[in-house]
Image (tube, rainbow, N blue to C red):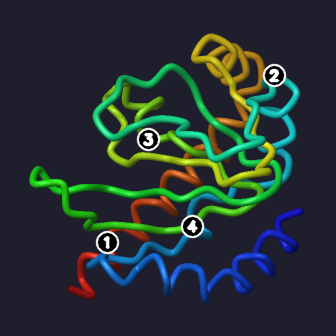
Amino acid sequence: MLEESRRVLETVSFFNSFVMEKSQVKLDSSAFIAEPELFEALAKRSTPVDCAEERVLFRQGELPQGLYLLRCGYATMTMESPTGDVVICTTAAAGSLLGLPGLIGNEPYSLSAKALKGAEVGFVTIEEFSKLMLTEPAMSVKVLRVLAAEVRTARRAVTSL
């Protein structure tokens, strides 16, 4: 699934370019993709989220309630400035974990996420996520890898300004 997600990300470059017209910073959306073993372990603990139409999963500034898994399709991730201008925008693809930094840090989400029409999304509660980390400690290293990828991507984006 990881290789397939990477190929899909390559095909959405046009969409990213279109969305980025009003944005200043572009993030490498592959940073959100989890290793298959972690994604599957989380998927087993998730409940489906109806995305027959576009659906806001969470908004920047909201307290995290859990973690979203993008099983199929796409989601947009955006960050707005205090004046409401979009300063970061990227497209996440299948295999992505959405909302991980907020969940881990128990801090408000730093981005907003919207699943596009037809996306298949799962939701893992904070409690289920915590249970997984306690019962399968090896998964915590895989979580750290996703977080590290997000940090690297953010740093690269900032240095490109």
Q: Which residue is mark 4?
A: 91
Instruction: Work out whether residue 139 or residue 129 is closer to the camera in this orientation and state it.
Output: 129
Disc 4 marks which amino acid?
Thr
Q: Which mark is residue 101?
A: 3
Tell me the mark number nearer the camera, choosing from 2 and 4: 4
| Residue contact at pointers 3 and 1, CB within 8 angstroms | no
| Chain-order first, disc 3 or disc 4 | 4
Disc 2 marks which amino acid?
Arg
| Relative to 66, residue 81 above or below | below
| Chain-order first, disc 4 or disc 1 | 4
Disc 4 to disc 1, C-alpha distance = 18 Å
Q: Which residue is mark 2?
A: 45
Disc 3 to disc 1, C-alpha distance = 15 Å
Q: Which residue is mark 1?
A: 155
| x, y percent for residue 77 | 47, 57
Tell me what residue is drawn at x 78 percent, y 32 percent: 42
| x, y percent for residue 160 | 27, 88
